[in-house]
Image (cartoon, coloured by chain):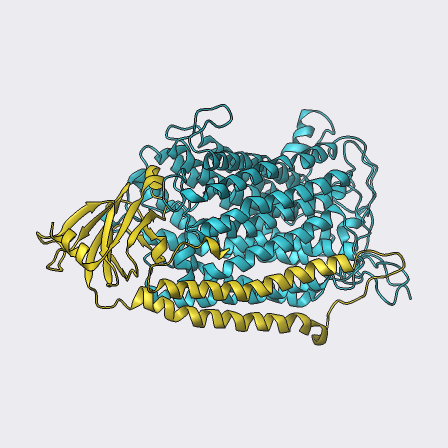
Chain colours: A cyan, B yellow
Amino acid sequence: MSVQAPAPPVEPVHESPSHHEPQTSGFFHFLRTYVFSVDHKMIGRQYLFTGLAMALVGGLLAYIIRHQLAYPGQAVLGHHPISADNYNAMITMHGTIMVFWVAMPILIGAFGNFLIPLMIGADDMAFPRLNMLSYWTFFLSTVVLVASFFVPGGAAASGWTAYPSLSVNGIPANQLGQALWVLAVALEFASMLIGGINYLTTPLNMRVAGMSLFRMPIFVWMQMAATLIFMLSVGPLIGGAVLLLFDVLFQTGVYLPDKGGDPLLWQHLFWFFGHPEVYVIFLPAIGIVGEIIPVFARKPLFGYKPIVYSTIVAGFLSFLVWAHHQFISGLDPRLAMPFSITTILISVPFAIVLFSMIATFWRGSIEFTTAMLFAIGMIAEFLVGGTTGIINGSAAADIYVHDTYYIVGHFHYTLFPAVFYGTFAGLYYWWPKMFGRRLDERLGKIHFWGTTLFFNMTFIPMLLMGIGGHQRRIFDPRVFTYTAPMHNLHLIATFGLYGLLLYQLPFVIAFVKGLVGKRTAERNPWNAATLEWHAPSPPGHGNFDQEFEVHRGPYEYSHPGSEKDFLPQWLPTTN
Amino acid sequence: MFRWLPENISTFGHDIDGIMYLIYYVVGVWFLLAEGILIYFALRYRRRAGVAAAYAPAKTLRPMLWVLIPASLVLMCDLAIDAKGSPAWEKIKRDIPAHDCLVRVEARQFAWNFRHAGPDGVLDTADDVVTSGQLHVPVNKVVKFELVSKDVIHSFWAPNLRLKQDVVPGRAITGWFEPTRTGTFGIGCAELCGTGHGVMGATLIVQSQSDFDNWLKK
C-alpha cells in the first residue's frame, strides 16, 4: 500500500480496483462516496443509520403498545384509541422490526462491515460490490416493510411468527400487508446472505501477515460464527416463506388442513431458523463486549480459545433445540424430552463464555468509561435473560409459562441487552474510529444509568405477570378475571418504558454532537491493542496508511515482560 | 416472584409448580453468584494509581478450571432439572388416565364452545350439553378433553389448572385434568388468533359431583 497525496473529503490512500471515477467532485462523486459506495466503512455507516432509524419506529410502536396496555381504550398521542386489529399489527411489526431491521443490520451489517477488514489488517472486504448490493437489498426490504403500514388492511397482524392459518386467511383483508411482510423479510434474508459471503471470506483470505486465526480479535470469530449459523439455518425458512406467500396469494393450502396441509409445518420451518437466529444476534454482541472488557480492564481476555471452541459447540447445538418453542403446539409429546435436554445443554457452552468474560475482570484495573458500563450492563442483564430461560426449556414447566408475559420478559432480557447494550457499548467505544470524534462521556453515563433503571422497571413486571398467568398479545388486560388484577404491573411497565424512551435523549444529543464539528479524536484514544486502532480516525479509503505485520495476539495488556502498559498487535517485537 | 402464581387446583399442577420452584431455587443461586461476582470484581478492581492489572489470559488448563468446574456443575444441575421434569411431562401429556367425564372443547374466532358428554358418557349423542363460554366439570374426577378448532390455531389456557394446549385446525388433540376444589376460574386463549384474541375468555366451573350431575341432566 503506497501513500498518496490527500484529497477531499476523505483521504484516499489506496485505490481499490473497483474505483475508477474520472472526476473528484460533483454530483456523481457525491453519489459514489456517500450513497453507492463500495467502501466497507461507508456501508457500515449506512447500515447503522438505517438500523437506528428503524429502532425509532420500533420504539414508537412499543410506546403505543404499552400505552394501550396501561390505559386501555384511551387515545394515544392525540389520535383515536387503537383497535384490536391495530394492536395486533403493532406487536407484529414491533417484533419484526426489532429482530430483522434493528438487531441484524446494526450488530452485523454496521459493526461487522466497519470492523472486520480493519481488525484483520485488510483494505476492504473481499467483495466490495457484493457488499454494496447487500446494503441496497436491505434498503429495499426496509421500504417494502414500511410500505406495508400504508396498504389497505394495514401491516401484517399475525405476530412476528406469522403462524398459519391466521397469517393465511385468519384476518380479513390483511393479506396484502402479510404478503408484503413476507417479501420484506425474504429481501432482508437475501441481503444478509449476500453480506455474509464477505464476513466469511474476508477473515479467511485477507488477514495481514502474522495474523493467524487465533490472533484474530474475538469479535471477528463471533461474526464468522453468527454468519455461518445464519446461512445454514435460513434456507428452510426462505422455502417455507415462499410457500406461505403462495398460500396467502394463491390459496395453495400448504399450511391449511382443509387443503391437506399442516400449520405445524410452518412452525418447524420458522423455528428451525428462529432459534439459531437469536444466537446470530447474541454472538456479535458478546463479541463487542469481549473487545471492550480487556481494553478497560487492561487485562487479556480470559480463556480466548475456550471461548472460541464453546461458541462453535453452542452454534452446533443451536440447530438441535428449535422445538422448545413448540412443546405444546400439538407436536408429538415424545419429542418434548429430547428437545428439553438439548435446550438445557446449551447453557453449558454459554456458561463457559460468560464465566470467562466475568473472570476477565478479576484483578483488572478497571476504568468505567461509558463503553465499559454498557459492556458490564450487557452481561449483568443478559444473566437475567439466560437464567429465566431455564424454566421455558423444561417442557413440563413450559406448559405454564408458554405464551405468557414470562416469555416476553425472558426474551427482552436476552435481546435488549444484546441489541441495545451491545450497540451502545460498541458505539461509545468505536465512535472515534468511525467518525473521528468522541461521544460525550457525561451524556453517556446519564444514558447508561437511565437506560438500566428504566429497562428493569419495564420488564421485571412482565416476568411477574407471566407467573400470574397473563397470556401474551392481549390488547385489553381488563377482560380476563385473572389478568385484570395485574393492572398495576402494567402501569409500572408502561412508566418504565416512558423513562426508557426518555433516557435515550442523552444518546440522541451525543449522537448528533458526535457527527458535527472538528474531528479531534486521536488514532488510539483508548490505548487498545487491536488493528483498527492503527488506522487513522476515521480511516481513509484503503484503511491503513503504513505497512505493518502482526506480531502477537489481540489482548497483550499489562504483559509482565514489558514496561509498556500494552503491546499492540502491530508493534514489532524488540530484540 | 411466586406470590403471583394463581391458586393451583389441579392434581398435576403440583408437579409443575414443583419443577418451577426447583428451577427457581437452583437457578437463583447461580444467578446471585454470577451477578454478585461480576459486580464484586467490577468494584473491587477499579483502577487505582500504582496498582497494575494482572496478566491472566488462562492459556493453560489450571486457570481455566475456575470456569470449567462451575460449568460442569451447571451441567449437573441441568440434568437434574430435566430428570425431574421428564416424569411430570409424561404424566400430563402422554399418559391419559381412565376418565370419569368427557368434554369436547371447540375453539373458534372468538369463543370457546364446550360439548359435555351427557350421562351416557359418549360425545355426539342426544344427551350432550353444549355451552358457550362455560366449562362445567365435577371436582376430584378425571376430566378428559378433546380440542378442535374451527378455523385458526388457538390455545386452551386454564392458569389455575396449570393446563395449556394449542388447538390446531385439522386435528383433535386430547388431554386430561383433575380439579381438586370447587369454584369458578378463568380460561383464556394463549395463541394469537386474530382480532378477538383479547376477548376470547371462558369460565371453568368446578362443581360437586351431585351439582354437576344435576346440571348435566337438565
Taking the image as shown, residue A237 lies to the left or right of residue A138, namely left
Q: Between residue A11 and residue A161, name the one nearer to us.
A: A161
Indicate the position of residue A128 as horizontal and vertical percent values: 64, 44
The number of callouts visible is: 0
**Extreme residue toward the bottom, this view:** B62
**Residue at point 71% right, 76% down?**
B62
Taking the image as shown, residue A496 lies to the left or right of residue B54, namely left
Q: Is residue A160 visible?
A: yes
Indicate the position of residue A528 as horizontal and vertical percent values: 79, 53
Which corner quadrant holds the C terminus of chain A? bottom right
Q: Is residue A210 above or below residue A464?
A: below
Indicate the position of residue A281 as horizontal and vertical percent values: 56, 51
Q: Between residue A123 and residue A279, name the one nearer to us.
A: A279
**Residue at point 57% right, 69% down?**
B74
**Residue at point 67% right, 44% down?**
A424
Q: Is residue B100 above or below residue A246?
A: below
Indicate the position of residue A210 as horizontal and vertical percent values: 76, 61
